[in-house]
Each structure stands twice: as structure tokens, then as C-alpha cells.
Image (tube, grey):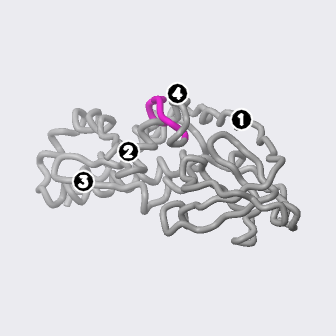
Amino acid sequence: MAEIDGDLAELEAFVGGMLKSLEPKARRRLFRKVATEMRRANQQRIRAQKNPDGSDFARRKAPPEPVPGNYAVKFLYPSGGSGTPRLVFMKSWEKQGPVFTGFDREAGGLRSFEYAKVIKWLRVDPEEDNAGGGKIRKRSKIRDRRMFRKIGRSGVLHTGQNDNEAWIGFAGSVAAVATVHQFGLRDRPARQSREVRYARRELLGMTAREREQLLDAVIEHLESKSLT
């Protein structure tokens, strides 16, 4: 799991003695609140497309301009990208990197396919080439939308705690994607693509103001317990 917990070292150093005075159950309850607040703050930042220092996330690089195909194509392709092979026939299509998109006559709509997943290319008969095959309609560019729309959700951004610490983070394949952006690492956009270096976009972190608010909340909680 990709996570952040180093920011809480400051908290523990500052109020460590008071934290140790709490029973384990009380500490877990407190750290659960801390983790929930950390998740809320990071979700808000991700939705706002901001790094912890207040700067905007680096914008996506402009995708290559699509190249229109000037001939019909016919091939076998796994259903849903990984299922049983099915027939695909397209007259109107365009290529964009390792993906080509067009009007899939068999499906009756616009579909995208990866070149690497094509099982077999088939011959297009003249009568098929002359038949109507639908047209590509202009769609809104996906890349113009806000980044990381899904991974900021509560069901994806996890929290955890024990007697000594609290944390937030991603798991599984989402953690792999988040780590690439968090540290600006190299990765392949698609299986057949060359590796590229991604811009650093800090999905997880805490601003100075958020750390202060968190410390204040913890101190207030501990003081209230000491008075009871």
C-alpha cells in the first residue's frame, strides 16, 4: 500500500507523552479520527488538482493527433478486451498511439481497440468495403477532464490505524499508478508503448496548515480527556 505516515512523526514527538498515557483502545479511537481527517483533506486536494504546497497538478501532455484510416479493417478481438474472440469490422476509424478507434459495425457504435490485442487480421471483401459502415462522431476529449477522478473516493483511498499510528493510502493496481505520479517515475502508458517519465503530482501529503489543524485537534482531544 502506498501511504503517508511520516507527517505524524511531528505529532508524536510533540504530544508523545500524552499519547502514551492513553489506553490502547483510546489511542486507536484517536488515530481513527486522525486518519479520517487526513483522508478528507487529501480527497479535497485531489479533487481540486492541487499539490500539498498549493501548486496545481502538472497538466497532461497533449496526446498525438489522431491519424484517420483510409481503408476498411476487419479482425478478431477479445470481447471486452480479454474475453471470447469476436469479429470487428470498421470502415471509419482513426489511430492514436497504440490504440485505434472507429465505428464498430458489429457492435453498432464507437469502440476503441489496442493493436497489441488483435488476435488475427482478416481480409476485407470488396462488397464489404463498399457497404456502409457508420461514421466517427466527434467526442469530448477525455484528457480535458479532471485527473484522478476515481482514486480520490473513500472506497479507493483507504485509512488504517493501530495503537501507535494512523495512515492513509492506496492498494493494489491503484497504488502502482499513484506511486508513479506521486514521485514522478517512469512507466509505460500502454503495454506496447515506450517508457515515459510522468510529471510529479503529489496525491498524498499534508499542507503546513493541515498539519497545524491536525495537531490542534489532537491536543484538544487529549486535553478534554485529561479533564474528565
Task: List x then y, in percent, for residue 192.
Answer: 53, 39
| Nearest to viewer (mark 2 / mark 4) | 4
Q: Give the range drawn in magenta.
A: 181-189
Query: According to the image, label 3 marks what residue?
Result: 161
Q: Residues within 10 Å of mark 1 (few under 14, many from 20)?
A: few
Query: According to the image, label 2 marks what residue?
Result: 214
Front residue of 191 and 23: 191
Q: Quadrant of the C terminus?
A: bottom left
The answer to which quarter of the image holds residue 208 is top left
Q: What element carries label 1?
A: loop
Mark found first going from the N terminus, 2 or 1: 1
Residue drawn at 48 percent across, 62 percent down:
82
Query: According to the image, label 1 marks what residue?
Result: 62
Whether pointer 2 and pointer 1 mark residues with C-beta atoms closer than 8 Å, the reply is no
Residue drawn at 57 percent across, 53 percent down:
118
Q: Distance between the residues labelled 2 and 4?
A: 34 Å
Identity, as a three-letter code, of the amino acid under mark 1 = Ala
Mark found first going from the N terminus, 3 or 2: 3
Q: How far apart are marks 1 and 4 (CA)?
A: 14 Å
Residue drawn at 51 percent across, 30 percent down:
195
Query: According to the image, label 4 marks what residue?
Result: 197
Q: How far apart are marks 3 and 4 (CA)?
A: 33 Å
Q: How far apart are marks 3 and 2 (CA)?
A: 15 Å
Identity, as a three-letter code, of the amino acid under mark 3 = Gln
| Nearest to viewer (mark 2 / mark 1) | 1
